[in-house]
Image (spheres, rainbow, N blue to C red):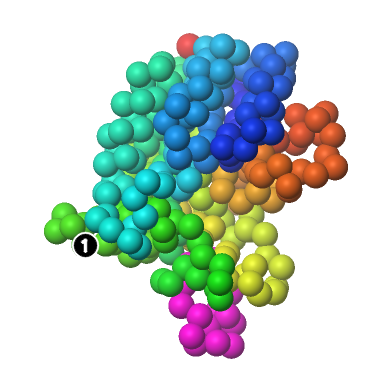
Amino acid sequence: MRIASVSDLHTDHPANRELVVSIAAEIHRRGADLVIVAGDVSHRDDRIERVIRAFLEVADRVAYLPGNHDLWSVDAKVEEGPKPDTWLRYREHLRTLVEGVGGHYLPGAPLRMGSLGIVGSTGWYDYSFAPSWIQERDSSLRFEDRRFGPVVWSDRRYISFLRADGTLMTDPEVARVMEDELASELAVMDADPQIEEVLVVTHVQPFDEVVYHTGRLPWEYFTAFMGSRRLGEIILSSPKVRTAIHGHSHVLRSEVIAGRRVYGTALGYPRERRGVALEEVLRTRIGWVELATGGS
């Protein structure tokens, strides 16, 4: 079985919309049984739908999970008015959209392909990847503020995961919910004798080894929003996991962690690829997994 993966297509940029066509053509040329989209396509439903349809033209199946950008409610800034519940978009709205065009919505249910199980969660961040020296150096830098001077982490403006009473959840609370849901799905896969191997997909990063650190501010402040250590611990707790795919960071990463291949091949923003030839983009921004297990 051959699986292609992409993430962070950010099709709100016209240049990226053009590249999706080239990426789909490359996947068709090389052949894939499944295309995995690991989040950050767009906050616009029509663009998410078009991406899924494009990949369904070149592969039999497409599995998608949203990134933080896909969850944005841009028309209703959280800081300025009534808070839309992001859980509804995550659990209901996007699942209906994706399944309606023939894709598989990974946060909704695992995907089984013969003896292969694929589980996924957007995951969230709990600030555990941020170096401790940041707040030791300046106690006024609060990760909860999601702001470094004039620079604001945009989730603060456009995302509002709500508790049952309508109050705003903290980022670590959201991370725990998503991690627990992933742990439950992995437990089901591990207990299923028909599943020989499990592939995990998250949008955020699950291991510090794949987080890009510079040792300098303001970059290191924003590593607080890359993912969570507990997410990685849950992945490593499953003996059947051999591969973990992530998105979110636009810095290409590939590591082997406790015998598991962990990688991200985000397309990212056009400005980040300035001077990179199309051939290099197609070589580095599509991830490939070859598996002996699986089947139709």
- Amino acid under label 1? Thr
Q: Magenta part of the protein: which range? A: 127-143
For the point 62% across and 38% down, the residue is 13
Q: Is residue 52 left or right of residue 3?
A: left
Residue 248's spot in the image, x, y percent? 56, 48
Please tell me in which quadrant of the rendered image residue 166 appears.
Answer: bottom left
Residue that appears at 41% across and 71% down: 144
| Residue on which the image places disc 1 | 167
Q: Crowding at label 1, few (<14), some or many (≥20) Cα neighbours within 10 Å?
A: few
Q: Is residue 45 above or below residue 57?
A: below
Measured as percent of width and height from the top left, residue 258 is found at 60, 51
How many callouts does the rendering have?
A: 1
- In the rendered image, residue 200, in percent from the top left (x then y), is placed at 49, 39
Foreground of the two, 193 or 12: 12
Q: Is residue 161 above or below residue 92?
A: below
Q: Nearer the viewer, residue 10 or 163?
A: 10
* Magenta span: chief secondary structure: loop
- Side of 287 relative to 191 (left or right): right
